[in-house]
């Protein structure tokens, strides 16, 4: 259905709806994801390494997915806004198809996140437990390794402390 011949208030409503829903929401998702990716505290926690064991990287996989979703939402929002202003059926059709695909991807990501919600926390718990066991063992005699283990535990306690 074309929006040609509609009142300017309807066109304005469609423009503002697209702007608020897609561009603003995409910008918020993108901003939060970039903040999570580049936050110094989280980066310190995720870059930990003790005796060859690294912190799990599944957290960053989720953050990269959020960055992609935010970017795509902003582009789709631009298509909708520009299509509404130009009254272009092609752009509005593309906007609709992209909305359906984006909705399907969001539902799939939500289901995947729900199914794997404990994976990230379990991996972090296992990493912490292994470092803690290393710190408590009497076999750790190398002062450099003791210092590294202590630093890892310190970063964990500072990062995951209750507010």
Image: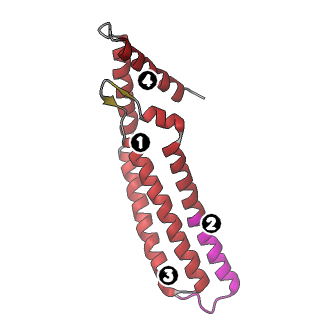
| Crowd class of label 1 (few under 14; some 14 to 19; many from 20; radius 10 Å) | some
Q: Would you say the residues marked 4 and 3 are in contact, meaning their CB atoms lie under 8 Å apart?
A: no
Secondary structure of the residue carrying tag 1 is helix
From the viewer's perspective, is 67 left or right of 137?
A: right
Dominant SS of magenta comes to: helix
Q: Would you name the residue on which mark 3 appears?
A: 91
**Earlier sequence position, callout 1 versus callout 4:** 1
Asked whether, in this view, residue 117 is left or right of residue 20, the answer is left
Specify whether residue 119 is painted magenta.
no
Residue 59's disc number: 1
What secondary structure is marked by label 3? helix
Along the polypeptide, which appears first: circle 2 or circle 3?
A: 2
Residue that lies at the very extreme toward the front in this rendered image: 144
The mark that comes first in sequence, 2 or 1, is 2
> Which picture quadrant has residue 149?
top left
Q: Which label sits in the foreground, 4 or 3?
A: 4
Residue 21 is a magenta residue: yes
- Splitting the image into 4 quarters, where does residue 129 fall? top left
The numbered mark, 4 or 2, whose residue comes first in the sequence reads: 2
On the image, numbered disc 4 is attached to which residue? 152
Tags 4 and 2 in contact by the CB under 8 Å rule?
Answer: no
Classify 11 as above or below 108: below
Q: Which residues are magenta?
A: 2-23
Question: What's the distance in space between the residues labelled 2 and 3, CA to CA?
Answer: 18 Å
Q: Is residue 78 above or below residue 111?
A: below
Q: CA distance from mark 1 to mark 4?
A: 18 Å
* Tags 2 and 1 touching, CB below 8 Å: no
Element marked by disc 4: helix
Question: Around disc 4, counting alpha carbons within 10 Å, would you say few (fewer than 14), some (14 to 19), or many (20 or more)?
Answer: many
Which residue sits at x=64%, y=82%? 11
- Residue 52, given in percent of the width and then of the height, sits at 30, 27
Query: Looking at this rendering, what residue extends furthest in the right direction?
Result: 9
């Amino acid at each position: 259905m074309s929006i040609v011949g509609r009142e300017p208030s309807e066109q304005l409503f469609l423009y503002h709806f697209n702007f608020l829903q897609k561009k603003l929401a995409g910008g918020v998702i993108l901003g939060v994801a970039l903040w999570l990716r580049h936050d110094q505290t989280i980066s310190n926690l995720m870059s930990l390494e003790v005796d060859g064991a690294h912190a799990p990287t599944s957290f960053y996989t989720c953050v990269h997915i959020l960055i992609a979703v935010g970017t795509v939402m902003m582009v789709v929002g631009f298509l909708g806004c520009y299509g509404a202003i130009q009254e272009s059926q092609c752009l509005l059709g593309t906007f609709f198809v992209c909305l359906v695909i984006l909705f399907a991807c969001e539902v799939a990501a939500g289901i995947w996140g729900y199914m794997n919600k404990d994976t990230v926390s379990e991996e972090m718990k296992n990493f912490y437990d292994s470092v803690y066991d290393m710190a408590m063992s009497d076999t750790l005699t190398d002062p450099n390794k003791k210092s590294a283990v202590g630093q890892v535990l310190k970063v964990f306690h500072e990062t995951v402390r209750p507010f």
